[in-house]
Amino acid sequence: MRLLTLARLVTAEGRGARGRLAGMAGTVAVGVALLLLLLGAFDGLASRTERSTWTSLNYGVSTRVDGPAAAPGDDTVLATSVPDFFKGRTITRVGIAATPASTVVVPGIGRPPAAGTYYASSAMIALIDANPGDELGARYGTRAGVIDDAALAGPDSLVIVTGAAPGDLNAMFGIWSVTKFRGSAYPSIGYRTVAIIGAIAVLIPVLILVGIVTRLGAAARAERFAALRLIGATPRRVADIAAAEIGATSLAGALAGVVLAWLLIPVAARVDVGDGRFFRADLTVGPIVVVIVVAGVVAVATAVAWWRTVRAGIGPLGVTRERSERRPAALGVLPLLAGVALMLSATIAALLHSPLPGASMILIAGFVLISLGLITSGPVLTSWVARIAARGARGTAGVIAMNRIQRHPRATFRAVSGLVAAVFMVSVFSAAITTVAGEPARAEGPDRLPLSTLIADLGTRPAEAAAAPAAASRVARTAGVTVAAIAYFDPQEGVVLAASDAARLGLPVPGGASHVHVTSDYFNGGPPVVAAASAPETTPAMLVVATDGTTGSIERARTAVLGSGLRLALPPVTRAERTTSALLTSANHYADLANLGILVATVISAVSLAVSTIAAVLDRKRVFGLLRLMGMPVSTVRRVILAEAALPLATVFALCVGLGFLVAWCILVGLTEGRRTVSWPHPSYYLALAASLLLAAAAVVGTFRTARKNTGVAVTRFE
C-alpha cells in the first residue's frame, strides 16, 4: 500500500509527467507491434514456402522416372511441373496422371483430377474468368474445383493442377512418380540462413528502440525521486517505485502494441513479397508468443529501470553533480573483430571450395557479433575521436560538446545507436540486392526478332516429325498470327528455316537459297547471322510464331501452340518473357524483403534518435539551465545538442557502410561458393542513406523545442 502511495506521488507531476508516460507507452506499443509483425512475418515466410513448394515435386516422396516407360499406380501418380505465362505473369502448372482408384492426396485438392479437368487457385480462376477462353481457359480443360488456400503461398498465387493421361505428360519437362506431395519450409540452407539473418537485422533496431525509451522517464523524474529520499524512502524503495512505474507503463504500452499489431495485420498482409501478398493468418502469431513478447518487454524494461535508478545514486538532495562514466575499455572492439574474423574465415573457405562444417551457423554468429560489436565498440571509438576533436575545438558549443562526450561516451553514443544500426542494416540489405542480376537491355530494331514473337522449343521425336508442319499450319490460322514457322536442327550451331518462312520473319535471304541457316543468338535478341543452307534434317528444333504484337494475339497464339499436339521441350514464351523468366530466382524475392527491411530500419532509427536525444536533454536540463542563467543563448545549446549527435555518428558512419558491404559479400559468397557476389549499389541506396540522415536531422531539430522549454531559468530555482 505504501509503495502504491509513493508511486502516486511520483506520477503526480501534472501534464508533463502524463505526457512522458504516454510517450513511453506509445513508443513501447510501436516497438511491440513491429516485433510481433516481424515474428509473424518470419514464421509466415516459412509457412507459405512450405505450403507452396509441393509444386516443385522433388520435396515429397517422389522419384524421377522415364515418361514413356512409366505408368501410375493406385498409390502413386505421375506428375510434371512447368511454368506457363499470361500477359507477363507466371503461372505454376502441375500436370497429374492418376488411376481412377488413386489414393494419393494432392495438397489443397484431395483426389487427383481426372484427365481433361483442372483445379485452380482463386486468383487463377479469377484470371481465367476475366479473359476470353481462347486466350487462357482453353489451355486447361474443364474446371473441376478450387485449390484450397492451405496449398498456396498467398491470395495472389497463380496455380493450376490439370489431369492428364500418362502419354500426354511431356517427359521433356521431367516426370516424377509421386507417392506423397510435400513442401519444404526452407528449400535450402542458404534460404534459411538469409531468412534468419534478415529477421535479426530488422529485430535489432526494434530492441534498441525499446531499450532507449526507458531512459525518457527515469531522467525526468530524478527530482521526484530525490523528494522521496528526503522524506525517508530508502534507495531500494525508490528503485522499486521506478521499476513499478516503468513496468506498469511498459505493460500498458505492450498491450496496446498487441492491439496495434492486430490492427496492422490487414495492412501488412497487402505488402507484395516474392510470390505475392500474405494471407492474414501468416502474419498472426500464437497466444503463447504474444504472452512471451509482452512478458519479456515488461521484464526487461522493469529490470533496466530498477538497475539504472540504483546506479544513479539519488540522494535526498538529488543528483547534484553529473558523474563521469568510466572510460570505455578497448575490449569493446573485440566482438566486432571476432565477427569479422568468423565471416571472413567461412567466406574464404567457401571460395577455396572447402566449406567449413556448419558454415551457415558461422555466418549467422559472425553477423550477430558484428551487429553487437558496432554497439559495444561505438563508445570506445567515440571517446578516442572526442579527445582528438577537443584539442581543436574553438567555439563554446564545440568545447562543451567535446568535453561532455569525453566524460559520457556511452550515453552519447547510446543516443545515436539506433541510427548506427540502421545505417549498417541498410548497407547490408542494399549490397545484398545488387546480387540480383539487372534485367539486360532488350535489343530492338528492324533487324532483330520482335519481342512479341513466341518461341517454343520442341522435343519432337523422329516418328512425330511428319506431323509438325500440319500443327504449325493450325497455329498459323489463329487470329492475330502472321507467321508460324518450323525451324529444324542444324549439325552446326543454330537452326535451318525455309527461305519463305525466313523472309516472312523479316530475315535477309540470300538470292536463290531454298533454306537459310540462322544462329541461335538471333532468337535471344542478337543480330541476324544468315547464310544459305541445304535441306535440313527432319527433326524440328523450334516453332517460331510471329503475331501482330497485341496482347490478345500473343496469348491466343500461346494457347494454340499448347493445344497443337506438338511435343514441347519448353513452354512457348516470347523473347521478352524468356529474359524475364531467367531472372525469377529466390534472390529477386529477397530483394523485396530487403527493401522492406530498409524502410523499417530507417523509420525506427529516426524514432530512436528523437527519443534518446529528448531523454538526454531532460537528463541535463539543470546543467543547461545554469548555462542559460549565465547568459548562454538558446542557439548555443542547440549547437551543443547537434554536435553531440553528429560526432558519434560521423565516427562510425564509414565503418557501418564498409562493414555492411563486407557482411553482404561474405553472406552471398559464403553461401554460394563464389557463384554470387555484390556490385556497386543502386542509386536508391544513396537515397536511403540520405533519407536516414535527413530523418536523423529532423529528429534532432525536433528536440530543440524540448531543449528551450526545459532549460529555462525556472529549472534552477532550487539553486
Image (cartoon, grey):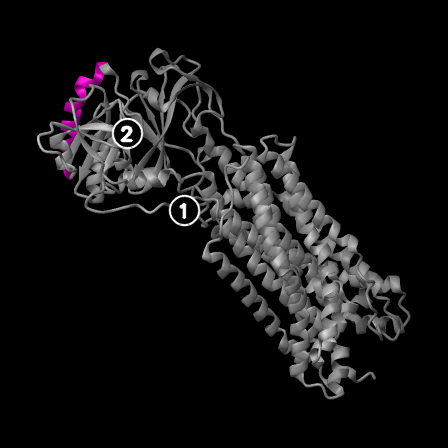
Q: Is residue 225 left or right of residue 172?
A: right
Residue 104 sits in which quadrant? top left
The magenta segment is: 463-481
Rendered view: 80 above or below 651:
above
Between tags 2 and 1, which lies in front? 1
Disc 1 designates what residue?
438
Q: Main secondary structure of the magenta part?
A: helix
Residue kind at label 1, given as amino acid type? Gly
Q: Tell me which residue sits at (59%, 55%) in the image.
A: 657
Q: Tell me which residue sits at (52%, 47%) in the image.
A: 432
Q: Looking at the picture, how far across and down is residue 387, in whole percent?
A: 76, 68
Of the image marks 2 and 1, the number of the one nearer the N terminus: 2
Q: The N terminus is located in which quarter?
A: bottom right
Q: Looking at the picture, how far across and down is residue 259, in whole percent?
A: 58, 54
Q: Residues within 10 Å of mark 2 (few under 14, many from 20)?
A: many
Viewer-closest of 120 and 216 = 216
Residue 13 visible? The answer is no
Q: Looking at the picture, how far across and down is residue 676, in whole percent?
A: 50, 40
Residue 296 is tagged as none
Dot 1 lies on which element?
loop
Rendered view: 706 above or below 379:
below
Q: Is residue 476 magenta?
A: yes
Q: Tell me which residue sits at (28%, 25%) in the image.
A: 568
Q: Looking at the picture, how far across and down is residue 711, in whole percent?
A: 71, 80
Q: Residues within 10 Å of mark 1 (few under 14, many from 20)?
A: few
Q: Is residue 325 magenta?
A: no
Rendered view: 66 above or below 458:
above
Residue 140 is tagged as 2
